[in-house]
Image (cartoon, rainbow, N blue to C red):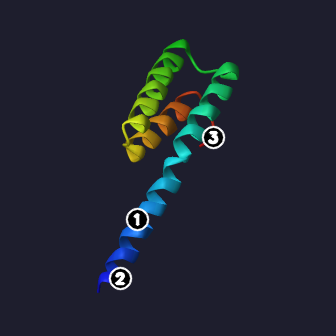
């Protein structure tokens, strides 16, 4: 029973660390794409706020919320997610 529990916990730790790597990739994509966007100034402003929020959430360890904010930011500027 202990072996199964250790295995499950180990799998969770490995997968959560792997998914944490998506956030920096998303904000790097945002930083690249925002320079060439044709979105309105209001959308760009909101997208930049979401990007900042996404980075803050990532650093706080809330990777699911971070990824959602970053994907929303990318959608606002017309990037493919």
Rendered image: mark on residue 12: 1
Residue 11 x, y percent position in the rendering: 44, 69
The quarter of the displayed image where residue 58 is located: top left
Disc 3 element:
loop
Q: Which one is earlier in the sequence, the residue at label 1 or at label 2? A: 2
Q: Name the residue under label 3.
A: 80
Q: Are marks 1 and 2 in contact (CB under 8 Å)?
A: no
Q: Nearer the viewer, mark 2 or mark 3?
A: 2
In this view, the residue in front, 63 or 37, is 63
Residue beneath the point at 40% across and 47% down: 64
- Tell me if mark 2 has few (under 14), some (14-19) or many (20+) residues whose alpha carbon lies within 10 angstroms of its own: few
Disc 1 element:
helix
Separation of disc 2 and disc 3 at Cα?
Answer: 40 Å
Residue beneath the point at 44% across and 21% down: 49
Residue 34 x, y percent position in the rendering: 63, 23
In this view, the residue in front, 50 or 43, is 50
Residue 64, compared with residue 30, is above or below; it is below
Residue found at the far left of this picture: 1
Q: Which one is earlier in the sequence, the residue at label 1 or at label 3? A: 1
- Tell me if mark 1 has few (under 14), some (14-19) or many (20+) residues whose alpha carbon lies within 10 angstroms of its own: few
The quarter of the displayed image where residue 37 is located: top right
In this view, the residue in front, 29 or 21, is 21
Residue beneath the point at 56% across and 16% down: 40
Rendered image: mark on residue 4: 2
């Amino acid at each position: 029973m202990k072996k199964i529990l250790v295995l499950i916990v180990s799998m969770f730790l490995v997968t959560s660390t792997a998914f944490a790597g998506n956030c920096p990739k998303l904000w790097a994509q945002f930083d690249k794409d925002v320079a060439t966007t044709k979105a309105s100034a209001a959308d760009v402003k909101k997208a930049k706020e979401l990007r900042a929020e996404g980075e803050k959430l990532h650093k706080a360890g809330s990777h699911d919320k971070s990824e959602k904010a970053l994907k929303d930011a990318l959608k606002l500027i017309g990037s493919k997610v």
